[in-house]
Amino acid sequence: MKLYTSRIGLLALVGGIVFLLTTTAALAMNEELIGAVVKTDQGNALSTDSGEYLILGNRLDGLEGNTVAVTGNVENGSESSTIRVKSLKVVADKDTVDPAAPSAGLKTR
């Protein structure tokens, strides 16, 4: 009986560790990026100081030109980078973006 109880305890411990590692890894992938929504051949993308990220999991039609803060999972690939959107907040409308700003839509008048 004691051997059976210790095996259950060991399995519970291993299961708990796996759960913690999985949730920690998932949380670590969430990033917030701020940039302008731009239309590309592949769909909408987020243009930031660090590059362009193809937007997955959310259609941002109608937000082209707006500056947004996007939180989601970022994957940096060899050919392109993507962000799977979990949340979105419009920071500045396209009417308030200074077209002379060096970064696409990151500065306002």
Image (cartoon, helix red, strand yellow):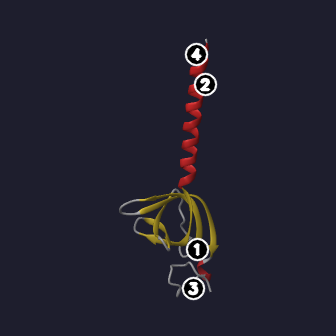
Around disc 4, counting alpha carbons within 10 Å, would you say few (fewer than 14), some (14 to 19), or many (20 or more)?
Answer: few
Q: Is residue 58 left or right of residue 90?
A: left
Q: Residue furthest left?
A: 79
Residue drawn where x is 53% and y is 54% of the image? 29
Looking at the rendered structure, the kind of residue marked 1 is: Thr
Residue count near mark 3 (Cα–Cα under 10 Å), binned few <14, some 14–19, many ≥20: some
Whole-percent x and y of residue 103? 51, 80
The amino acid sitting under disc 2 is Gly
Instruction: State the separation of the CA atoms marked 1 and 2.
Output: 51 Å
**Residue type for callout 3:** Asp
Looking at the figure, which quarter contains the N terminus? top right
Foreground of the two, 70 or 78: 78
Disc 1: which residue: 67
> Does label 3 or label 2 sit earlier along the sequence?
2
The three-letter code of the residue at mark 4 reads Tyr
- What is the crowding at mark 1: few (fewer than 14 residues within 10 Å), some, or many (at least 20)? many
The residue identified by callout 4 is 4
Q: Are marks 2 and 4 in contact (CB under 8 Å)?
A: no
The numbered mark at residue 9 is 2
| Residue at position x 57%, y 26% in the image | 10
Counting labels gives 4
Q: Is residue 52 left or right of residue 35?
A: left
Residue beneath the point at 56% across and 21% down: 7
Q: Position of residue 77 (x, y in %)?
A: 39, 59
Q: Secondary structure at mark 1?
A: strand
* Residue at the disc numbered 3: 98
Observer-side mark, 3 or 2, equals: 2
